[in-house]
Every structure is written in structure tokens, then in C-alpha cells.
Amino acid sequence: MERAYRNGDRVLVRRLSRNGVPDIGRGGVVVAAWRPPSGDPPGALVTRGEATRPASRPPGAHGWMIKRVVAGPGDPVPAGLGPALAARAGKPVPQDRFVLLGDNAAHSHDSRHTGFVQRGDILAVVVRRLTRPR
């Protein structure tokens, strides 16, 4: 999300209840739990240089991600989103699923790689970025 938010920015969010009515609109920014793709073996590690991280987690991921909502339940899946959603392009997004993309497409690990994000994995809606302390 480098265009709207930089690494280290603090944001004000409105938490969503699991049972409440979702107020997640297209174009909005959300905080979602990062879930590994199902194809990676649990506990697998990738070593690049001196940094070691779980194989299924993108570099710098800490369990949460901030992404923009580009399609919600009933909206058509946008075309050109990569292999994870290529077969679904133009079809409606299933109920309780969302397509989330990062603003910095070249360096974003998002629905292009993982597919749909479940409603239960969306934790909060970003209200605004907080000012940085001096």
C-alpha cells in the first residue's frame, strides 16, 4: 500500500464484529488477517541471504495486511488479476468473499496471489492515517 500508506504508518481503524453487518465498501481500505496459500507445507522456511521467513508468508508480513477492496460479494471479479482469480474473471464474487489489492502492484501480495479473502478475515476498516510523531 505504498502509495496511500508507508511501512510504519499508524492508522485509525473501526473494528468489525464477526456477526455484525459488514460495512466494507469498494474502494475502501481494510486490515485483514494474512492467511497462507493452501499449497505451502506448514512450517516450510525460505532463506534469502540472512533473512528467514515462512515460505507461505510474503517478505515483511506479520499476520495482518492493509489492502484496498476492489470487489465485494456480487461484484464482477476484475480481469487481469493473475493466476489465483483468472478463471473467475467477470463472474460474481461469492457471498462473504472479497477481492483485495495493494496500491503498489509490483510489490503487493494480495488477491492476485491468494484469491478471495473471506469476510471473517477482514478485521477492520481503515478510517484514516494518523500523523507521525516528530
Image (cartoon, grey):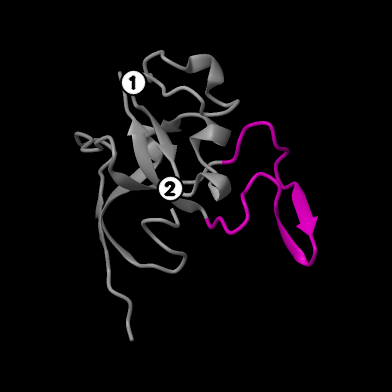
Residue named by callout 1: 95
Would you say the magenta stretch is mainly helix, strand or loop?
loop
Extreme bottom residue here?
Answer: 134
Q: Which residues are drawn in magenta?
A: 36-62
In the image, 73: left or right of 66? left
Image coordinates of residue 83 in percent, x first then y, are 60, 25
Q: Is residue 126 above or below residue 42?
A: below
Q: Nearer the viewer, residue 58 or 121?
A: 58
Q: Which of the 4 image quadrants contains residue 27?
A: top left
In the image, 7: left or right of 92? right
Mark 2 or mark 1, which is nearer to you? 2
Find out whether residue 51 is within the magenta segment. yes
Residue named by callout 2: 103
Quick one: label 2 or label 1, which is nearer the N terminus?
A: 1
Image coordinates of residue 134 in percent, x first then y, are 33, 86
Q: Which of the 4 image quadrants contains residue 4?
A: bottom left
* Residue neighbourhood size for the residue with mark 2, other residues' Cα within 10 Å, grouped as few (<14), some (14–19), many (≥20): some
Image coordinates of residue 57 in percent, x first then y, are 62, 48
Image coordinates of residue 72 in percent, x first then y, are 32, 28
Residue sitting at x 78%, y 58%: 48
Q: Is residue 100 above or below residue 61?
A: above
* Residue neighbourhood size for the residue with mark 1, other residues' Cα within 10 Å, grouped as few (<14), some (14–19), many (≥20): few
Identity of the amino acid at label 2?
Answer: Asp
